[in-house]
Amino acid sequence: MNTQNKSTQNSYNWFVARPIMAGYIVFIILMLISAFVTFLSYQVEKKNNQRELSNIIKVIDQNIDQILDNSELAAFSLALTINDSGVPVDFEKVAEEILKSNSSIDAVQLVPQGIIKYIYPYEANKSALDYNILKDSTRNKEAFKAIQQRKIVFAGPFELRQGGLAIVGRLPIFIDNKFWGFSAVVIKLSTLFRNAGIANTENEGYKFQFSKINPDTKVREYFIKYDNNDLFSRAETSFIKVGEWTLQVAPSQHFRSLYGIFALAAFGLLFSIISALFVSNILREPAKLQQLVKEQSKELVLSGQHNNAILQALPDMLFIMSKDGVFLYHHNSAKMETLAPPEFFLNKNVTEIMPPLLAKEILANIKSCIEKNKSIVHNYVLKDAEENRHFEARYAKINENEALSVVRETTWQKKTEEEILHMNEELRRLSEYLQNVREEERASLSRELHDELGQQLTAISLDLHWIKKTEPVLSKKILHKIEDAITLVQESAATVKRINTELRPSILDDLGLFAALEWQVKEFNQRYDVKAHFNCEAEHYKISPSRSIAIFRIIQESLNNIAKHARATNINIHCFEESSNLKIVISDNGTGFYEKDISSKISFGLLGMKERANMLNGHVHIKSAPGEGTRVEVCIPLEHLDEEINFRKSSTVTSNDA
């Protein structure tokens, strides 16, 4: 074993002493391997390309055979239109059906005695009528061949009298063993190529040549031809006997199949060069590797210092715990006060230190974070001699057997949150109290306007009417002044009535909430050019005055917002019961808005609506989108709906706190 190790070491030392020579050896070996692999790949690619060409030409042969078979069947069907007297019956109808069912045929003909007498479609081919094909020496050879063989013969491609290159299949017709003429089908060359798949395949990287030996000149004519003869030196060739046509297919680019081979050879060369340089550099520069190791070691030390500085700056306490709940390590640079010194926890199980229920939760969290590889937050409370102390622990997986626990005391935050909640509750009570005071002031002012100012205006109006009637002789000027005063008093009375109604509608106290809402909708329709509709299915519910005025103000504020901002033309207000709640839905067809926009702005009207709903233990929800209108949903629990709201108790608490 020692001898073998020594021999290996000597070989390594030899290469280390001759790095350039070692690079040359590696280059030659890899180049030989690459050349062999490239040659094998070339042979495989060559066979694959030839097989692909063979498959393509086979498919096109089959397509052409299918087209010609369908054409022969079409010619035979057309021949059946000729009755025993030699007269075609329903030629156009049958011809139309043939062309509809066979997209590879462009025209059909009946050629009695070699003269084209019947043709379909007519307009595009009428120039061929009365053409005698048997007398045309350039076109009659295949026709006579068809008569002689008594079967269909395809002629062409040649130029049609009506224009365009096409092939023509002529089926000879015999009646009582006497030649009658031909049933012919015309297939344009472009149609043949399209249906055979030649046109589509050309776009996929292949080229075709389609040719035939001219029966007159004995010279091969090409109907698809490319000047690049070298391209077709590797072509696949097929001879279509029925028309004596020759079809060839070749790749559109001469070296298309060699691109992958060239790339492989280039890769082999490049890989050989890179490998040789790599080996040479590795053997030449072992000292650099040692230097690199030293530099990386230095970076690791520096990184450790950085991590230690980060740990020292953390305000939290860190524990590393085993999967079974044993404290393995602690770090408390911020000197956070704990119920026991952190050293007390080391090498002890959480079940020995923490209360049983809390220990069970900690073990479950450690297990969950390790199994799911997911950070877990755990809030818990510990009691000391003076107070309850709140903590937040975050667990993160280190490996399959250990987890990191970051512990932070949150007692101060919890106290702050409780104070904020208490303050919010006090503010809510104050808001409820102010709402009630405002409504009481409105009611008081409304009563004073009605009882005092209203009566005084009525008395003044009566006195003015009495003066006007009892004084027979009054100057026109005085009479005019009295009439102006009466008008002014009446207008003032109307204004007082309107203000009185706006302060607190008397109908709300007399007839209840739903009658007041119906009245409010009518008033809204008269004041604004909007059609508002009110539909109530909850009239049988008894609602206390304080709750009625709160709900009424919510609906009133919603209508005011629609009038100011919505530009709506239609409003629907629907009151109904849903899941033990009184639900009121106000919807309009206005401009709408983005809900996030209204959330980011302070709208005292909307805040007031929500606060009034909160007073009733309900809520207000607004849905809207630009161009889709707005929908306001007010939901109030039916329970205690007939009871008054106890504002005074809330206001007393608020005052004492103040």
Image (cartoon, rainbow, N blue to C red):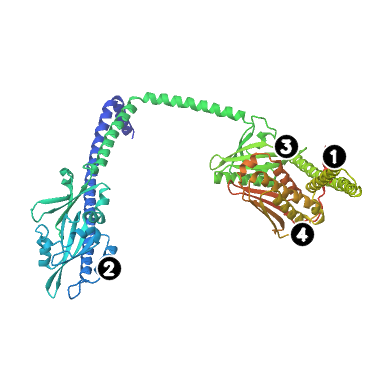
Return the residue nearer the eye: 282 or 600: 600
Q: Residues within 10 Å of mark 4 (few under 14, many from 20)?
A: some
Q: Is residue 83 above or below residue 209?
A: below
Residue 470: give x, y in percent of width and height: 91, 49
Give the distance between the C-alpha atoms of the residues marked 2 and 3, in whole angstroms.
95 Å
Residue marked by disc 4 = 541
Q: Quick one: SS at disc 1?
A: helix
Residue marked by disc 3 = 416
Q: Earlier in the sequence, mark 4 or mark 1?
A: 4
Give the distance between the C-alpha atoms of the residues marked 2 and 1, in whole angstroms.
105 Å
Residues under numbered marks 4 and 1 in contact, where contact means CB atoms less than 8 Å apart:
no
Residue marked by disc 1 = 656
Foreground disc of the pair 4, 1: 4
Foreground disc of the pair 3, 1: 1
| Residue type pointed to by label 2 | Lys
Residue marked by disc 2 = 93
Quadrant in the picture for the N terminus: top left
Q: Quick one: SS at disc 3?
A: helix
Q: Earlier in the sequence, mark 3 or mark 1?
A: 3
Q: Earlier in the sequence, mark 3 or mark 4?
A: 3
| Residue type pointed to by label 4 | Tyr
| Residue type pointed to by label 3 | Thr
Residues under numbered marks 2 and 4 in contact, where contact means CB atoms less than 8 Å apart:
no
Residue 15: give x, y in percent of width and height: 29, 28
Return the residue nearer the eye: 206 or 95: 95
Give the distance between the C-alpha atoms of the residues marked 3 and 4, in whole angstroms.
43 Å
Q: Quick one: SS at disc 4?
A: loop
Give the residue drawn at x 70%, y 51%.
525
Give the distance between the C-alpha atoms of the residues marked 3 and 1, in whole angstroms.
22 Å
Foreground disc of the pair 2, 1: 2
Q: Is residue 144 above or below residue 304?
A: below
Q: Earlier in the sequence, mark 2 or mark 1?
A: 2
